[in-house]
Amino acid sequence: MYEIVYDGIDEKEEYKEVIEKVLSQCFKEEKLENSKLCVTVTLTTPKTIQEINKQYRNIDRATDVLSFPMFEKDELDKKIQENDFENEDILGDIVVSVDKVKEQAIEYGHSFERELSYMIVHGFYHLMGYDHIEENDKKIMREKEENILKELDINR
């Protein structure tokens, strides 16, 4: 269901526990727990996420989270509807800047766990084909994100 890669940061049990809990709830909510879909979560530094952002999005600045989906939304929806998961498929990659998570937790006045959880949920829903460019799409995505956090009792 998931793999965690530590790139330039120390491995911590806290990170693993949060990622596992959040992704398990995401998979459950989207009825994917019996699929063979896999998410790779890379926890990294601001420098590395900036390099990735520049390379793949042509934006030369650090960010908090990046998502790289393997499927278009309609393609994934069809696979889910037809339960077409015979082989292990990669849902996509989520890259998180741990320093940025720490910084934003302080800035927004909530816990590190809450901020990391939000980054994982946010990244997951991008992998599922959701975005927040248009206001209506943003509303749908935010509702899904908040529902996951609420189910896990992770509050602001």
Image (cartoon, grey):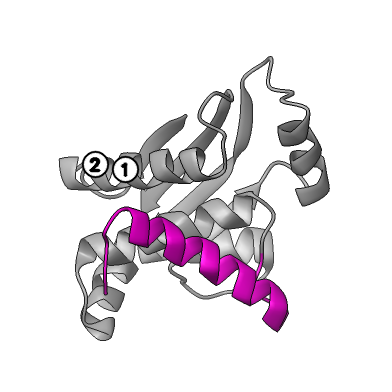
Q: Residue 146 lies in magenta, yes or no? A: yes
Instruction: Please provide the residue range marked out in magenta.
Output: 131-156
Kindly state the secondary structure of the residue where label 1 is placed. helix
Whether label 2 touches label 1, CB < 8 Å: yes
142 left or right of 58 in image:
left
Q: Does 24 sit above or below residue 44? A: above
Q: Nearer the viewer, mark 2 or mark 1?
A: 1
Badge 1 amino acid:
Lys
Q: Position of residue 9 (x, y in %)?
A: 26, 50
Q: Position of residue 113 (x, y in %)?
A: 23, 60
- Residue 86 - label: none
Residue at (33%, 70%) from the top-left corner?
Answer: 100
Quadrant (top left/top right/bottom left/bottom right) for the C terminus: bottom left
Query: Residue visible at 27% across and 62% down?
Result: 154
Q: Which secondary structure is most common in the magenta stretch? A: helix
Q: Looking at the image, is 36 positioned above or below residue 70?
A: above
Is any part of residue 48 visible from this angle? no
Asked which quadrant contains residue 89, the reply is top right
Identify the residue under disc 1: 21
Of all residues, the one furthest to the top in this rendering is 86
Report which residue position mark 2 lands on.
Answer: 17
For the residues labelled 2 and 1, the Cα–Cα distance comes to 6 Å
Tally of marks: 2
Q: Is residue 84 left or right of residue 94?
A: right
Residue 6, position in %: x, y? Answer: 33, 42
Residue 126 versus residue 104 in the image, above or below:
above
| Callout 2 amino acid | Glu
Residue 93 part of the magenta segment:
no
How crowded pointer 2 is (Cα within 10 Å; few <14, some 14-19, many 20+) is rated as few
Per the image, label 2 sits on a secondary structure element best described as helix
Q: Based on the displayed image, in which of its 4 quarters is residue 141 positioned?
A: bottom right
